[in-house]
């Protein structure tokens, strides 16, 4: 488990570094996005990964790793947007966003550690393509919840699905680096 924790920290640090650098380039322009737009951005990335996995080739040079990083970062943006839904500020200070990034990355890691305890790190025996499919399934679940105006009867909410997508994408990054 210690190995997983260290690998997780390394992967999330790469994601955060890119997140903060892009924020310095673009500010928090993503504040304009509704949850449905964030979901669609993640869908585009996951669908591109799946197409590359299925076809075995790609024509755009952006590698699959960068798409998984994007899934992590957009999922964290989704969690931040849910948290700040009543906050009308379009531009947020870098230090505030960095703290929010850490908050949600830590929540996702804690969830991962709890699930790994119960499931015995079953993800290590999974194919990366299965992790991609699980991300796509979570996206379809979020879209259905959005279509239901955020209401669920028995299921977890949008935030839980964002947390799971963070973890599946981190697992994929770990597996791709092994």
Image (tube, helix red, strand yellow):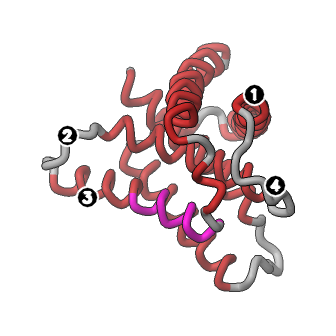
Element carrying mark 1: helix
Residue 3, compared with residue 109, is above or below; it is: above
Residue contact between numbered discs 3 and 2, judged by CB atoms under 8 Å: no
Element carrying mark 3: helix
- How many residues crowd mark 4 within 10 Å: few (<14), some (14–19), many (20+)? few
Residue 6, compared with residue 167, is above or below; it is: above
Which residue does the image show at 65% across and 45% down from the upper left? 76
Query: Residue 95 bears which disc, if any?
Result: 1
Query: Residue 84 bears which disc, if any?
Result: 4
Q: Nearer the viewer, mark 2 or mark 1?
A: 1
* Mark before the other along the chain sequence, 3 or 2: 3
* Front position in the image: 37 or 130: 37
* Front position in the image: 143 or 6: 143
- Residue bearing mark 3: 51
**Percent position of residue 71, x then y:** 50, 47
Element carrying mark 2: loop
**Part of the protein shown in magenta:** 35-44
Q: Nearer the viewer, mark 3 or mark 2?
A: 2
* Front position in the image: 8 or 28: 28
Q: Nearer the viewer, mark 2 or mark 4?
A: 4
């Amino acid at each position: 488990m210690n190995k997983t924790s260290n690998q997780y920290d390394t992967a999330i640090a790469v994601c955060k570094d890119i997140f903060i650098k892009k924020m310095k380039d673009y500010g928090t322009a993503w504040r304009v996005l509704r949850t449905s737009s964030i979901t669609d951005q993640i869908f585009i990335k996951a669908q591109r990964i799946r197409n590359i996995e299925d076809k075995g080739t790609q024509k755009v040079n952006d590698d699959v790793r960068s798409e998984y990083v994007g899934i992590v970062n957009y999922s964290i943006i989704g969690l931040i947007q849910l948290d700040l839904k009543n906050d009308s500020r379009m531009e947020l200070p870098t230090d505030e966003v960095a703290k929010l990034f850490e908050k949600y990355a830590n929540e996702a890691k804690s969830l991962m550690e709890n699930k790994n305890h119960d499931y015995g790190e079953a993800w290590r025996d999974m194919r990366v393509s299965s992790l991609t499919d699980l991300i796509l399934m979570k996206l379809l679940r979020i879209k259905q919840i959005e279509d239901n105006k955020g209401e669920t009867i028995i299921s977890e909410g949008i935030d839980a699905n964002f947390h799971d997508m963070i973890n599946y994408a981190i697992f994929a990054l770990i597996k791709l680096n092994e």
